[in-house]
Amino acid sequence: MSTSSGNGTKPTTKPRQRNQQDVLDALLRGDRLTQQDLVHQTGLSRATIARVTAALIESELVEPEKGVESPAGVPIDVLSIRANAGAAMGIDFGKKHVRVAVRDIGGGKEVIRDTDEELDVPNESERSLNVAVELARKTLREARFAPEDLVAIYVGVPAPVDFQGRLAQNTGMPDWLTQKPAEELKDRLLWDVPIYAANDASLGAVAELEWGAAHGCSNVVYMKWSAGVGGGVIVDGRLVRGANNLAGEIGHALVPGVESPTKCGECGLVGCLESVVGGKTITQGFDGINELSDLVREARKEDASGPLRKVLIRAAGQVGQALGPIVSTLNPEVLVIGGAFYRAGGDYELIADPLRRGLKATAYPASLDLKIRIGTQTGKAAVLGGVALVLREHLRQFLFDRL
């Protein structure tokens, strides 16, 4: 694929391969391009484009289809990356479940499967990893791909994950503190596929950016609000990772003037978002309400004076107060709330107004020109975020390696 001079200089790319890479880059940016489009975008001659596209079609990386018509009324082929030239996989470890998604690189085929057994993931790392391996194999077979077809795998876990693949200490995942989830899965799967791990809320932000409530935006703050509180930040269209891959931990921003009953078990602070508005806290005292999703579901049935609705209104205001300085610092176009909240359920009406009032109390006024949206990928955000990050960060090299 590349050549070296043998004297320690960097490998060089052959002109033919470079031309193929230029065409693939153009198709990755635009998709469904004619040969004339490719001439304009790459600067290559018509003859070169004809040769390159023929070679890419023969190698089954690119596919043609009848598209636009010429001025003479003759159909002209449009070219795109072949949808089944590869696939991406996401694996999501929730607190009680494992979920796997496989999606072809063209987005035409997607299979998402959950384990059919309830798990205690924080306290059962070995069992959870083994379940994930079997579910990954089953889902890949169902999607009719082989391991060698996979671009990469992204694994989401409900905890901060550093660049070495280790979970941060005091994460509420006691049985995982000596584990590196990506390495553990690679050892068990025995697939020659790159595997990476990330915080599930960061992956949720990418899913909403790619296919959901933040699609078309470049600067996003995403909050996963469920049993705990997590977050992800997108700046200029890219996931912000920080120095140690720990960016986005908005769950440990302090709520001004509010103290939680006890210190947060993760950050040790009194009054952080997770300890004040996390589902473990605000569901206490309600019979039959064990999860934040239960509270939200029942609150939908109440009017504004209902006890559950009041709890959410107060909590949403506190969320806004804590996020105000973050909004002032990052100036996002959109704030997306996911986790236990569903757009289809009408949950915007439950929390948007008090959340915005909270923001106004602590944010720089000019930064408040932002949209508040409920996530559209709730329930599958982490696993699809893994798929999206694979395609965003690794597809280009995967295709180049096949030239």
Image (tube, rainbow, N blue to C red):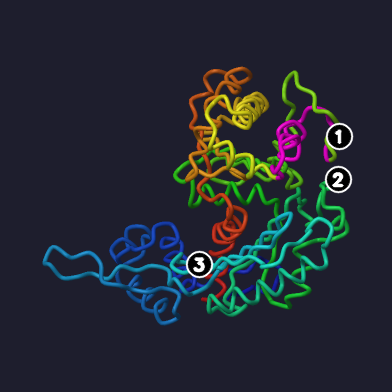
Q: Which residue is mark 2?
A: 170
Vertical side of 57 occupied by 366: above or below: above
Q: Earlier in the sequence, mark 1 or mark 3?
A: 3
Residue 383 lies in quadrant:
bottom right
Query: Is residue 267 rendered to the left or right of residue 353?
Result: right
| Residue 286, horizontal then vertical, whole percent | 71, 36
Crowd rating for badge 1 (residues with CA inside 10 Å; few <14, some 14–19, many 20+):
few
Number of residues whose C-alpha sits closer than 10 Å to that of mark 3, classed few (under 14), some (14–19) or many (20 or more): some
* Contact (Cβ within 8 Å) of mark 1 with mark 2: yes
Q: Is residue 283 above or below residue 179?
A: above
Q: Marks 1 and 2, Cα distance to the nearest angstrom?
A: 9 Å
Mark 2 nearby-residue class (10 Å; few <14, some 14–19, many ≥20): some
> Separation of disc 3 and disc 2 at Cα?
35 Å
User: Which residue range is magenta in the image?
Assistant: 266-290
Q: Which comes sooner in the sequence, label 3 or label 2?
A: 3
- Label 3 sits on residue: 110
Q: Quadrant of the N terminus?
A: bottom right
Q: Is residue 61 visible?
A: yes
Q: Residue at x 75, y 36 (%)?
A: 284
Q: Is residue 251 or residue 305 the one in the foreground?
A: 305
**Magenta stretch contains residue 32:** no
Which residue shows up at 76% across the image and 51% down it?
Answer: 161
Q: Position of residue 74 (x, y in %)?
A: 15, 70
- Whole-Å distance between the Cαs marked 1 and 3? 41 Å
Check disc 1 and report the residue beneath it: 268
Measured as percent of width and height from the top left, residue 332 is found at 54, 33
Q: Nearer the viewer, residue 60 or 233?
A: 233
Under mark 3, the amino acid is Glu
Residue at position x 45%, y 64% in the image? 22
